[in-house]
Each structure stands twice: as structure tokens, then as C-alpha cells.
Image (cartoon, helix red, strand yellow):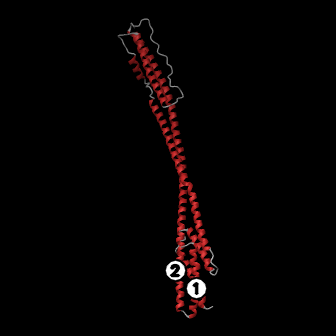
């Protein structure tokens, strides 16, 4: 075999290998790993076609494109199926969070109202002033000194009036507290009642008038002292009762405040958990959507990039054809003959390799 024949034979498929190199040079291997892998599969099939050019054409390329198309469809269907439940799942999760927020707000308002009720009730509690001078002034103003009418009945009436006034005052305050407790729905452990205090015994004597000023003043002073002690006991009993109520309701208020804080924390933790779950669902949905879109884009890119292979093959095929034609026209007789034979092979090779891409599905 002469050198011209050997050279032609050696370069028979050089145009196809050059096309492959040009084709590979357009790819960034790190840009799209899936696309590059698929193109590599395509090139391996072409490599086999080139290395075994004398074997009859198989349907490897056609099968490759059909399998690649089926794989893409299956991926898209898989991602679409996986995406289906997420819309409902995310909607339901948002509804659960909304209900939890509403429940948290409702409970917070209930606790706030209850705490405010305790606060308003506690503001109604006002202790009596047990300073001796204030009680002495009340007693002296009520049980008056009447030197011109030195009568036991006048002193007794004043004492009775003092007791009625104090009892009415304290009784009215207690009644108001009872009404407030009922209005605010505060249940107290002990009843709101003052302990019984015996009344001040009246002055009893046959003759109503005091003949002597000294005797009158002594009786008046004695009654004022008893009245002072009686008022002091009444006020202390009243203050003891209100202090017990104050302490009890304060405990209720503090306990409710702690329960409110615990409820707030519990709801916050539940909402945080639900929001984290929602974020996970949304992230998973976004990832699936991204994969679905990448698959769609990959399908488009694959066809676009793979279709360019035919252009590279045609370009190099035409260049090699031009070279052979030049040899047919201008070389010596033997070289022209061999070149003409290789032009026939070139046409068959072109049909085998270039046209196989069309039959495989790339147009």
C-alpha cells in the first residue's frame, strides 16, 4: 500500500475527530454536570461509530436520544408528582399557624383581662387610718362636750350615733367589695364579713342630768375612752379583713401573671416549631421546583448543544471534502483515483455519522 493510500486511510475519520474536539471545546465541564454527562454518553456512542466504521449502522444514537428523552420526562414527572402535595401541605400549615396565633392572642387577652380585674379590685381596697389622733378627733367631734346640757341621754345618743356611723361606713365599704368581687368573678377563700364587736354599754342612771360638772366630765371622758377603743377595734378588724383579702387577691394576680407568661412562652414555642416546619416545607418545595425547572432547562440545552454537534461535523466534513476534491483536480493520476474513491467513502461516512444524528432525534 503506497504512502498516499496510507495517508488517506489514516485520515479517513480525522474530520470527525476534529469536529468532536471543536464540539467539546464549547462546554464548561463545571457549568452543567448533568448536561455534560449526557453529552459524554453521546460522544461515546459516536466514538464507537468511528472506531467501527465498517459495521452496519445500529440504532445506538436513536436509542440514546429516546432513552435520554424518556429519562427527562420521567424526572419531570417525578418532580411534578413530588411537588403536588406541597401546595396543600403549605396552605394547611399556614392555617394551623394562623389558628395557633389566634388562640395565643385570645388566651393573652383573657389573661390580661383577668389580671386587670384583679388590679382594679385591689385598687378598691383602702385601709382605715388607725392613727390615735384621727380616731380621737372622730370620737370627740361625735360625742360632743355640752356643759350647758349635762345629760346622760345626750352622751348615749352621741355614742349610738358614732357606732351607727362607723358600722354604716365599714358596712358600705364591705358591701362594695362584695359586689366588686362578684363583678370581677373573684372567689375568695374566706367570706367578706367583719367580726362581731359588742356595742358600747350606755350610761344607766335614774336621773338623766348630771348635777355636778365634774361628774359629767368624768362620765363623758369615760364614754369617749370606750368609744375610742371600740372604733379602734372596729378599724383593726376591718383592716385585718381587707389585708387578708389583699394578700389573697395579690397571690391570685401573681399566679395569673405567671400562667400568662407560661402560656405566652408555650404558644411561642409551638408557633416557632410550626414556622420552622413551614420553612422546611417551603425550602423543600423550592428545591423541587428548582430541580424541575433545571430539568426542563437541561432538556432544552441538551437538544440545543447536541444539535450543534451536527454543525461541527458538517463543517469539518466539508473541509475534508474540499481537500479531497482538490486532490482529484490537481494531484497525479493515482492520487486522483484514490481521492475519488475516498470521496465516495466520505459520502457514506457522512450519511452514517451526520445523518445518524437526524435519525437519532437531533435536528
Tag 1 and tag 2, C-beta contact below 8 Å: no
Residue 84 screen position, x and y as percent: 56, 56
- The circle on residue 315 is 2
Could you tell me which residue is drawn at 45 percent across and 33 percent down? 120
Residue 230 screen position, x and y as percent: 46, 19
The quarter of the picture where the N terminus appears is bottom right
Res. 110 visible in picture = yes
Q: Is residue 163 left or right of residue 43?
A: left
Q: Is residue 168 left or right of residue 272?
A: left
- The circle on residue 112 is none
Give the residue at the far right of this rendering.
55
| The one of 140 and 97 positioned closer to us in this rendering | 97
Could you tell me which residue is drawn at 47 percent across and 27 percent down? 179
Give me the C-alpha separation between circle 1 and circle 2: 18 Å
Quadrant for residue 5, please give it: bottom right
Mark 1, Cα crowd under 10 Å, few <14 / some 14-19 / many 20+, is few
Q: Provide the residue designation for mark 1.
A: 344
Residue 112 screen position, x and y as percent: 48, 38
| The one of 217 and 337 positioned closer to us in this rendering | 337
Residue 192 screen position, x and y as percent: 50, 25
Res. 11 visible in picture = no
Mark 2, Cα crowd under 10 Å, few <14 / some 14-19 / many 20+, is some
Check disc 1 and report its element: helix, strand or loop.
helix
| The one of 72 and 4 positioned closer to us in this rendering | 72
Which of marks 2 and 1 precedes in the sequence?
Answer: 2
Give the residue at the far top of this rendering.
206
Count of residue discs: 2
Check disc 2 and report its element: helix, strand or loop.
helix
Height in image: 140 above or below 292?
above
Amino acid at each position: 500500500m503506497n504512502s498516499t493510500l496510507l495517508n488517506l486511510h489514516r485520515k479517513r475519520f480525522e474530520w470527525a475527530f476534529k469536529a468532536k474536539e471543536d464540539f467539546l471545546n464549547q462546554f464548561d465541564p463545571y457549568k452543567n454536570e448533568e448536561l455534560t454527562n449526557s453529552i459524554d454518553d453521546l460522544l461515546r456512542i459516536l466514538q464507537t461509530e468511528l472506531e467501527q466504521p465498517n459495521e452496519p449502522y445500529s440504532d445506538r444514537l436513536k436509542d440514546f436520544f429516546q432513552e435520554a428523552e424518556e429519562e427527562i420526562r420521567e424526572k419531570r414527572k417525578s418532580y411534578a408528582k413530588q411537588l403536588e402535595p406541597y401546595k396543600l401541605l403549605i396552605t394547611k400549615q399556614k392555617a394551623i399557624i394562623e389558628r395557633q396565633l389566634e388562640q395565643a392572642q385570645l388566651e393573652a387577652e383573657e389573661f390580661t383581662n383577668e389580671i386587670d380585674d384583679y388590679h382594679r379590685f385591689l385598687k378598691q381596697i383602702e385601709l382605715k387610718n388607725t392613727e390615735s389622733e384621727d380616731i380621737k378627733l372622730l370620737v370627740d367631734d361625735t360625742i360632743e362636750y355640752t356643759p350647758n346640757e349635762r345629760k346622760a341621754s345626750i352622751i348615749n345618743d352621741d355614742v349610738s350615733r358614732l357606732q351607727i356611723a362607723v358600722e354604716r361606713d365599714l358596712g358600705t365599704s364591705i358591701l362594695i367589695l362584695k359586689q366588686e368581687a362578684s363583678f370581677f368573678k373573684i372567689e375568695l377563700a374566706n367570706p367578706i364579713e367583719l367580726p362581731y364587736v359588742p356595742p358600747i354599754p350606755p350610761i344607766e342612771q335614774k336621773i338623766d342630768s348630771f348635777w355636778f360638772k365634774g361628774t359629767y366630765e368624768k362620765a363623758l371622758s369615760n364614754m369617749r375612752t370606750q368609744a375610742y377603743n371600740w372604733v379602734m377595734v372596729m378599724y383593726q378588724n376591718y383592716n385585718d379583713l381587707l389585708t387578708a383579702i389583699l394578700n389573697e387577691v395579690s397571690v391570685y394576680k401573681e399566679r395569673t401573671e405567671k400562667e400568662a407568661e407560661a402560656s405566652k412562652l408555650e404558644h411561642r414555642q409551638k408557633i416557632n416549631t410550626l414556622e420552622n416546619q413551614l420553612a422546611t416545607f417551603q425550602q423543600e418545595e423550592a428545591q423541587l421546583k428548582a430541580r424541575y425547572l433545571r430539568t426542563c432547562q437541561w432538556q432544552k440545552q441538551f437538544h440545543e448543544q447536541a444539535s450543534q454537534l451536527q454543525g461541527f461535523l458538517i463543517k469539518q466534513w466539508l473541509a475534508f471534502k474540499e481537500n479531497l476534491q482538490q486532490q482529484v483536480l490537481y494531484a497525479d493520476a493515482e492520487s486522483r483515483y484514490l481521492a475519488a474513491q475516498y470521496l465516495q467513502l466520505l459520502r457514506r461516512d457522512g450519511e452514517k455519522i451526520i445523518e445518524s444524528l437526524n435519525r437519532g432525534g437531533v435536528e
